[in-house]
């Protein structure tokens, strides 16, 4: 089965920083990767689909890139509302699993 | 507006059964794949099961295969998860999520979840 590895598991950053989260697949998933954001006590929210397509209403400081087995989520200038946990999900083939998550915390 | 409302969670003893429901509105239900995802307390997201828009294709995580059954009723616009032989490790908040196409299984829209607690 495919494995998804996210790194880092925790990231400490400050408002205004540029941050990058990486997601690696154990085999090619083409561009079938989604990024979601989850805040404490809330359901996750989809930010990016198909590796780089920003969902409607998501701020342009979020961007996604990559294809095949390596993907990144970048926040160009971190805002206070961005401190949350981020998950990647592959949907190329069964099982449609998530990465372990990256908790973005304030430095 | 897409809305997903989960129900059916609760406290159950190990070995027991529960059926979760997810009532959908705001979109043509039969046109979209649906997924169940769970989150144990303090843990990450775990993909559990998915079903195509037509209901002809179903998928399960190894951890629930043979114990859980996903199904959908397009007349009632409702997704189900029948959970049998429940274990303590099935304790989690269970979310349903809508896909982006009839056979595309990314979690696009999420419900608010229903809590399942397996304990004696």
Image (tube, rainbow, N blue to C red):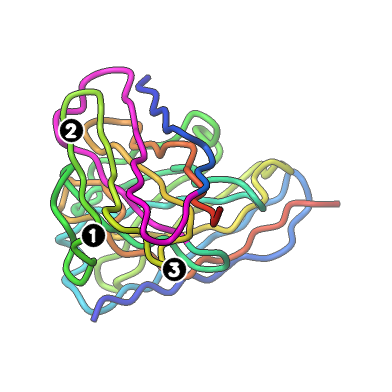
| Magenta range | A13-38
In the image, which is nearer the foreground, mark 3 or mark 2? 3
Q: Residue at x 23, y 59 (%)?
A: A61
Q: CA distance from mark 1 to mark 3?
A: 13 Å
What label does residue A61 carry, if any? 1
CB under 8 Å between discs 1 and 3: no
| Classed neighbour count for the residue bearing mark 3: other residues with Cα under 10 Å, few (<14), some (14–19), many (≥20) | few
Above/below status of B119 relative to A91: below
Q: Nearer the viewer, residue A33 or A52?
A: A52
Q: Are marks 3 and 2 on the same chain?
A: yes
CB under 8 Å between discs 3 and 2: no
Is residue B79 at all visible to an observer of this figure? no
Residue bearing mark 2: A66
CB under 8 Å between discs 1 and 2: no
Counting residues from the start of the chain, the first of labels 1 and 3 encountered is 1
Q: Is A15 one of the magenta-colored residues?
A: yes
Q: Residue at x 33, y 26 (%)?
A: A24
Is residue B15 at all visible to an observer of this figure? yes
Residue bearing mark 3: A80
């Amino acid at each position: 089965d495919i494995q998804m590895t996210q790194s880092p598991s925790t990231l400490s950053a400050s408002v205004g920083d540029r941050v990058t989260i990486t997601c690696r697949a154990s085999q090619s998933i083409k561009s079938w990767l989604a990024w979601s954001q989850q805040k404490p006590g809330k359901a996750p929210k989809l930010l990016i689909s198909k590796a780089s397509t920003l969902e409607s209403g998501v701020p342009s400081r979020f961007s996604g890139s990559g294809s095949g087995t390596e993907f990144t989520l970048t926040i160009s200038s971190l805002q206070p509302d961005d401190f949350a946990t981020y998950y990647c999900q592959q949907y190329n083939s069964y099982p449609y699993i998530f990465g372990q998550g990256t908790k973005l915390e304030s430095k | 507006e897409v809305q997903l409302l989960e129900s059916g969670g609760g406290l159950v003893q190990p070995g027991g059964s529960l059926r979760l429901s997810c009532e959908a509105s705001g979109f043509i239900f039969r046109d979209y794949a649906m997924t169940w995802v769970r989150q144990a307390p303090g843990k990450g997201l775990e993909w559990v099961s998915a079903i195509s828009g037509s209901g002809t294709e179903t998928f399960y995580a190894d951890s629930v295969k043979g114990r859980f059954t996903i199904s959908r009723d397009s007349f009632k616009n409702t997704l189900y998860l029948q959970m049998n032989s429940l274990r303590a490790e099935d304790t989690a908040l269970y979310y349903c999520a809508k896909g982006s196409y009839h056979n595309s299984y990314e979690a696009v829209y999420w419900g608010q979840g229903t809590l399942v607690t397996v304990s004696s």
